[in-house]
Image: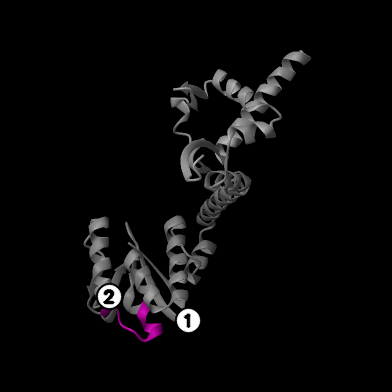
Amino acid sequence: MNNQIFQYNGNPITFQIGKATMVNATQMAKPFSKRPAKWLELPTTKEFIAELKAIRKSDRLVEAINGIGTWFHEDVALEFARWLSPQFAIWCNDRIKELMRYGMTATTQTIDSILADPDNAIKILVALKEERSKVTALENQLNFQAPKIEYANNILLSENTYTTTEIAKGLNISACKLNRILSKKGVLCQQQGQWVLSPAYQIKGYMTTKSLSYNRKNGRISSMFTSVWTEAGKTFIYKLINSIENTIFASVES
């Protein structure tokens, strides 16, 4: 076991580092003039600890040691810290993260230890550099993917629908020609005289059904269901036609 003691607003708080980090809850509560026992009596606290015990499969979540005080497992300590003060909870969370990643936190004792053991300081700095490199790489990846993710979400969440005629018009071809192209590429097939998506494409969300109203000869209004293309379907068709055109141009140029 290794103890780390650091100051919060002039009050010492002890972290005990082992397989799991234990925190002196009595010391945590002192700056706020509160006691751990009061928090442990709350129904919400009892429910939280019971659930945590079942998940962590550990009985070493709360320990009372005579003359030293009450100790909380790190998960319990963070929940207790939120009850004491949101700002204090964030501060505790940061210290626990440092202890888990580097086995140390920036206390006076740690600084003295680094000065006394330069080799240990190098190991800590290398670990810190590697961690920051991972974070930077992840941030760069997210920034690179953000426009693509936003574009994909806009397509998937769009409620716009289009008829084959509307899409064909945007491509400067007839609806019949578009249907023939999609049939040749295996996207569409005919069932009972109607163009429908081939089985391989039915799960991709390219088409949906839409209710259309129309006037009958007797003046009554009726409705019918028809298949229309979704935003994702329209995007797919445009990409497919563009790919076909590029292939044709490439063969002509060669």
User: Residue at the front extreme?
Assistant: 218
Could you say where residue 152 lies in the image, as x and y percent from the top left? 57, 43
Q: Nearer the viewer, residue 104 or 48?
A: 48
Q: Is residue 140 left or right of residue 252?
A: left
Could you say where residue 196 lies in the image, as x and y percent from the top left? 48, 27
Location of mark 2 (residue): 70
Could you say where residue 67 lies in the image, as x and y percent from the top left? 25, 79
- Spatial distance from mark 2 to mark 1, Cα to Cα? 20 Å
Q: Nearer the viewer, residue 224 or 96?
A: 224
> With respect to residue 157, does 165 lie above or below?
above
Chief secondary structure of the magenta portion? helix
Instruction: State the extent of the magenta-drawn residues as a range.
Output: 28-37
Quadrant placement of the C terminus = top right
Does the magenta segment cover residue 112?
no
**Where residue 106 is drawn, which disc sits there?**
none
What residue lies at 27% left-to-right and 81% top-to-bottom?
Answer: 38
> With respect to residue 37, does 128 lie above or below?
above
Q: Give, as a three-letter code, the residue at label 2.
A: Thr
Q: Quadrant of residue 253?
A: top right
Location of mark 1 (residue): 9
User: Residue at the bottom extreme?
Assistant: 33
Q: Secondary structure at mark 2?
A: strand
Q: Secondary structure at mark 1?
A: loop
> With respect to residue 253, does 213 lie above or below?
below
Q: Give, as a three-letter code, the residue at label 1.
A: Asn
What residue lies at 23% left-to-right and 78% top-to-bottom?
Answer: 41
Crowding near pointer 1: few (<14 within 10 Å), some, many (20+)? few
